[in-house]
Amino acid sequence: MKNYLLKYGQFFNFKEFIVVFLILTIALGIRLYNVSERTSFDADQEWLAFRAVNVFKGDLPLLGPTTSVGSFSIGPGYIYLLSLSGLFTNNAPVTGVYLSVFLGIVTLILIYFFTKHFIDQKSAYLILFLTAISFNLISWDQLPWAPSLFYSSQIILLIGAYLSN
């Protein structure tokens, strides 16, 4: 791990920073454009919002929402993140959307670094751009739901598995 950090301590040069920054700015703009009208707030989002508000009232969840496949619960991590982001927006209903968009941008950054490390720089730019303008990823990032953490978690687990060798 220490050798990895020394080898990749400088993540960006200036040209690389500008290209990645422009692509991420485009991605953020697309995801936030007219976001309050393009998102939905259904029963699942309502349940998450109420659980997030109750965190500061002392009701700490140990399980997250129940999935429709197999009736098992996913972790409460999204609820805790939603409650923290609710502090900045006064628990507005659109808080979950902003959190999901933020997690989507973090996922794009992780995809870029993962691709840059395991493939090459040009492929990292291409994959970053394609995922930044992907209709499906944009739609998922505009929906406040607990699986928003899955994409980032998968990349972090892959990097962790690689670094453990």
Image (spheres, rainbow, N blue to C red):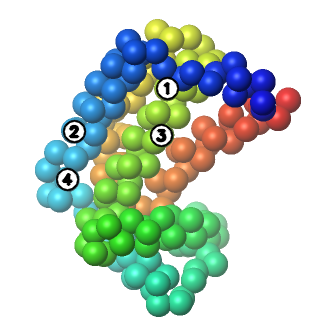
Amino acid at dot 1:
Tyr
Quadrant of the frame with the N terminus: top right
| SS state under label 3 | helix
Left or right: residue 46 versus residue 118 is left
Above-or-below relation of 135 to 56: above
Cβ atoms at labels 2 and 3 below 8 Å apart: no
Measure how far apart labels 1 and 3 are at the Cα level: 9 Å
Look at mark 3 in the image and give the residue it sits on.
107
The disc placed on residue 35 is: 4
Residue at 57% across / 83% down in the picture? Answer: 60
Q: For residue 117, what is the image quadrant?
A: top right
Question: CB of mark 1 within 8 Å of CB of mark 3?
Answer: no
CA gap between label 2 and label 3 equals 16 Å
Q: CA distance from mark 2 to mark 4?
A: 10 Å
Q: Residues within 10 Å of mark 3 (few under 14, many from 20)?
A: many
Q: Residue at x 71, y 23 (%)?
A: 6
Looking at the image, tell me whether mark 1 or mark 3 is earlier in sequence order. 3
Tell me if mark 2 has few (under 14), some (14-19) or many (20+) residues whose alpha carbon lies within 10 angstroms of its own. few
Q: Earlier in the sequence, mark 4 or mark 3?
A: 4
Amino acid at dot 3? Thr
Q: Is residue 28 above or below residue 87?
A: above
Instruction: Check disc 4 and give the amino acid type.
Output: Val
Q: Nearer the viewer, mark 2 or mark 4?
A: 2
What is the spatial separation of the Cα atoms under label 1 and label 2, in whole angstroms?
18 Å
Q: In the rendered structure, which disc, 1 or 4, sits on the residue that comes first in sequence? A: 4
Please tell me the numbered disc located at residue 29.
2
Q: Secondary structure at mark 2?
A: helix
Numbered badge on residue 112: 1
Q: State whether residue 142 is above or below residue 145.
A: above
Q: Residue at x 68, y 34 (%)?
A: 159
Which residue ends up furthest to the right in the rendered image? 165
